[in-house]
Each structure stands twice: as structure tokens, then as C-alpha cells.
Image (cartoon, rainbow, N blue to C red):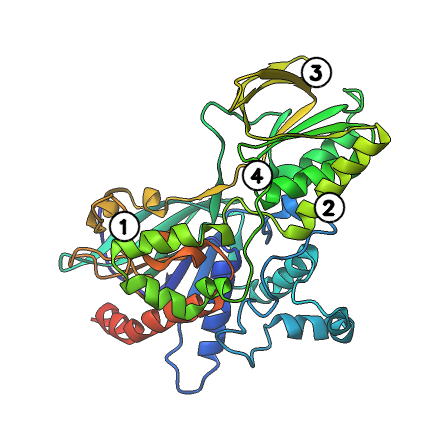
């Protein structure tokens, strides 16, 4: 049942659901806002289901690099003078000169993750780790929803906090093809490093002799190379529906699709233009691979063909049509899309590197979701400041970090505009905080 809005204890101007890079960037923006002498302070709290900060830990392969410039960090495009920048991190780690001498815009993924942890460590008082949000209930005042009671389950049971504004930064959910299910022998690449470590420690099975990797994107290519490196006596079979890995377009003009200004242009474009833009520039992000990695994998295939020791095999223009788990692995049936010829692969492990899908934040809202406006395709309508468009009786703010590709464009789930988006969300919230404080004080 809706509750009447009373009292200020445990009431926050902003409660963030999730604490990945998106809401970490928001936390930084709030901290920098509150440091201004002329600012009305914004009180924030973030609820994160993981027990510590982590961002795609399962893919922190030692030699994997970022695919975006270090300048697209948590703050620089919003505030180039911030001491939360990647350059500030490098300086604190005594690696700034060494990084400059490297002459690269793209740090190791392990290093960038360490930067994120370095920044997150400065918000221990604002984050409750190990807390998974389970329900969001409306808090009403004179028939209007002026806030939300957010309940999360954690190590000590459940806890409830009150939010004047709720910001969803829940990240992405691993995607699996229809009928696929994860197990000890069927993985998603999200869990790669942890699963490999367990496999290497296990004494219950003999050393693996064959892996299959399903997918055609950057992660699939990285997994294929990693397994080929890590298990020098095992065969690695890459299965994908394309003729070959497609190179990503990271040319300067194409990269403009990730600029903050591109979000403005995309937002006001008519639906048919939005669709054109997404189609034209899909090869900047979706199911594409860095050229250097493509060339390295091809070099390995050719070298093995010359030497007569073929461990890396490509099943292109193909798909997995059936998987059956056996006592010692997975039997995968691969079918050619052109000839319909079928090949049975008895694998120790099958890895799906088939990407992610946005997590549906509205699933947490219960009946409140009915107050959110939608387009003709059932997708939520989102204002330019990333606030959900709602019925008038829902006065409190609901904001999305992610799940906005249909309104804000291709960069919605990427790091490219994270810093700028965090500032825009905070600016939107900060303009309403004095008004919300006045309402709660009545």
C-alpha cells in the first residue's frame, strides 16, 4: 500500500540502483556539486548487489585493451579539471610518464578497471554493497507520488531507504540463444576467468581437449584467443554465422556517433532517421572486432595450417543447432547455414560469447510501471535529461542510465558519454531538490 510521506531520516535526494561505472560517474558528479559553496547539497546513496566493486571482471584478460580512449573516463568530458580523472589515477600510481611514453589512447582493460576501483574506493560511505533492490514502493503526499521507499536485501536482512529521485544504473544482462542454459560445462563469457580458474584447479576431470566458442564479436574473438593461449594442447573451435569476423569502424568521422552532441541530434530525429543512424553505424559497436585481433587469429590459423598442427578451427556461416550435456562435457551439433551439413563436436566446454541485453529497470517498479509512458512499441518514453516520462501524479524522478538506445542513441550502454550523462542527470535532479525539500517540510 502507498505510504504517506513523513519524516526525513534515511531520506535521500538520489538513490542509485547499481554501482557500476554509470552510477559511479554520478556519485562523482554529486560529490563535485556538493563541494561548491553556492550549491544546495544533494544527498545520495547507492545500492549494489555485488559485495565489492566490479565491472566485467570475467573478461579482465591480461593483454586485452579498452576500445575507447582513456579521455572518455568517468569525468573528463564533463569536468577536465577533476581529480577523479584517469590521468589523476595514473599520477597517484606513479605511472603517468610511463603511460605517456606508451603513445596509446587505449589502456589495458585491467588497468582501467583498477582506475574504476580507485575512484569507487572514495565512496565507501555512499555505497551499500551486497544489497540487491527487491521492491520500490510509492510514497504519496496529497495523492501525488513524491518519493519512493526502496527495499533491498543484504547481509543483515532487508533494509528500506527513502528516495526523492531514483536512478537506475543496473547494467546489462548476459544474452543466451533460445534453449541455451548455463552449467559447469556451458558458460557465458561474462564468467570466463573464474570458470577457467576452476577448470584448471579441478582434479575431477582430465585436461580439456576441445573448446567451442559461439559468437562473432570482440568478446568472442578475445575468448577464442585466450583459450588458445591458455590451453596449448586443446582445440578451440569458433562458431559464428558470418563469413568471418567483421572489423569495427573506429575511424574519426564514424566515431562522431559517440559524441555528446550526437545524442542531442539523435534525440530530436524522427523515428525513421533514428533507425537509419543505428543501421549505418552498427559496425562501430555490434558484433565487430578490432582489426589487430582479427589479423592475429588469421595468422594463427594459417601458421597451424602450414605446420600441420591445427588447433584453432573456424566454423563460419554456421550455427549451433543442438547441445547435449554428457558425463564429461557437451556434445554440440554445428550446422552450416549454406550446405546444412552438420558436424558434431564433443567439447569439454562450450562458451557463449553472445553479448548482453539491457536490464529492464521497470520490472522493479511493480504497479508504478503503469505510470510510465510508452511509445507505440511499448518502450518507455525518456526525456532528454534521461528522466522517464510519467503521468502527472508521479512527481518524483525516475532516471535511466542505460536502456535508452531507442531515444538517445548507440552510446547509451557504452562509456563514451557516461561522464556527460551523469552531469545532465545531476543537473536535472539538482534543480528539483529545493522544491522537493520544500514539499517534504510541509
Residue on which disc 1 sits:
380
Disc on res. 76: none
Alpha carbon distance from label 1 to label 4:
30 Å
Residue on which disc 4 sits:
216
Q: Is residue 213 visible?
A: yes
Report the mark closest to the observer, 3 or 2: 2
Position of the N terminus, as image quadrant, is top left
**Residue lying furthest top in this view?**
327
Q: On the image, which quarter does residue 430 sit in?
A: bottom left
* Residue 299 relative to residue 59: left or right: right
Residue on which disc 2 sits:
296
Alpha carbon distance from label 4 to label 3:
27 Å
Residue on which disc 3 sits:
328
Residue at horizontal 61 percent and vertical 67 percent from the top: 70
**Residue lying furthest right in this view?**
307
| SS at mark 1 in the image | loop
C-beta proximity under 8 Å, tags 1 and 3: no
Amino acid at each position: 500500500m502507498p505510504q504517506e510521506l513523513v519524516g526525513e531520516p534515511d531520506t535521500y535526494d538520489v538513490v542509485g540502483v547499481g554501482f557500476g561505472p554509470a552510477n559511479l560517474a554520478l556519485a562523482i558528479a554529486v560529490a563535485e556539486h556538493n563541494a561548491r559553496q553556492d550549491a544546495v547539497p544533494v544527498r545520495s546513496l547507492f545500492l549494489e548487489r555485488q559485495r565489492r566493486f566490479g565491472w566485467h571482471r570475467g573478461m579482465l584478460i591480461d593483454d586485452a585493451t579498452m576500445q575507447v580512449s582513456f579521455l572518455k573516463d568517468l569525468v573528463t568530458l564533463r569536468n577536465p579539471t577533476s581529480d577523479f580523472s584517469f590521468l589523476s589515477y595514473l599520477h597517484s600510481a606513479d605511472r603517468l610518464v610511463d603511460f605517456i611514453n606508451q603513445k596509446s589512447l587505449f589502456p589495458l582493460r585491467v588497468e582501467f578497471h583498477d582506475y574504476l576501483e580507485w575512484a569507487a574506493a572514495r565512496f565507501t560511505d555512499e555505497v551499500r554493497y551486497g544489497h540487491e533492490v527487491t521492491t520500490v514502493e510509492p510514497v504519496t503526499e496529497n495523492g501525488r507520488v513524491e518519493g519512493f521507499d526502496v527495499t533491498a536485501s543484504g547481509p543483515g536482512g532487508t533494509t528500506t531507504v527513502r528516495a526523492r529521485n531514483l536512478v537506475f544504473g543496473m547494467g546489462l544482462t548476459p544474452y543466451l540463444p533460445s534453449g541455451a542454459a548455463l552449467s559447469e560445462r556451458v558458460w557465458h563469457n561474462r564468467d570466463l576467468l573464474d570458470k577457467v580458474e576452476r577448470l584448471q584447479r579441478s582434479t575431477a576431470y582430465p585436461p580439456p581437449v576441445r573448446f567451442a566458442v559461439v559468437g562473432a564479436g570482440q568478446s568472442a574473438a578475445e575468448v577464442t584467443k585466450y583459450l588458445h593461449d591458455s590451453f596449448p594442447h586443446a582445440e578451440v573451435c569458433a562458431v559464428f554465422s558470418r563469413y568471418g569476423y567483421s572489423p569495427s569502424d573506429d575511424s574519426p568521422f564514424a566515431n562522431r556517433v559517440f559524441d555528446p552532441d550526437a545524442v542531442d541530434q539523435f534525440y530530436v530525429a524522427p523515428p525513421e532517421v533514428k533507425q537509419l543512424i543505428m543501421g549505418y553505424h552498427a559496425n562501430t559497436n555490434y558484433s565487430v572486432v578490432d582489426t589487430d585481433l582479427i589479423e592475429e587469429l588469421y595468422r594463427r590459423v594459417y601458421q597451424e595450417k602450414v605446420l600441420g598442427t591445427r588447433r584453432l578451427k573456424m566454423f563460419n556461416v554456421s550455427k549451433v543447432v543442438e547441445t547435449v550435456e554428457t558425463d564429461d562435457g557437451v556434445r554440440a551439433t554445428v550446422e552450416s547455414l549454406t550446405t546444412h551439413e552438420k558436424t558434431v563436436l564433443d567439447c569439454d566446454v562450450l562458451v557463449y560469447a553472445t553479448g548482453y541485453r539491457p536490464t529492464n529497470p521497470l520490472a522493479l517498479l511493480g504497479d508504478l510501471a503503469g505510470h510510465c509512458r510508452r511509445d507505440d512499441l511499448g518502450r518507455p518514453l525518456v526525456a532528454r535529461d534521461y528522466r522517464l516520462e510519467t503521468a502527472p501524479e508521479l512527481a518524483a524522478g525516475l532516471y535511466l542510465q542505460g536502456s535508452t538506445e531507442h531515444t538517445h542513441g548507440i552510446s547509451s550502454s557504452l562509456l563514451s558519454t557516461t561522464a556527460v550523462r551523469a552531469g545532465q542527470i545531476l543537473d536535472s535532479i539538482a534543480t528539483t531538490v529545493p522544491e522537493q525539500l520544500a514539499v517534504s517540510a510541509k
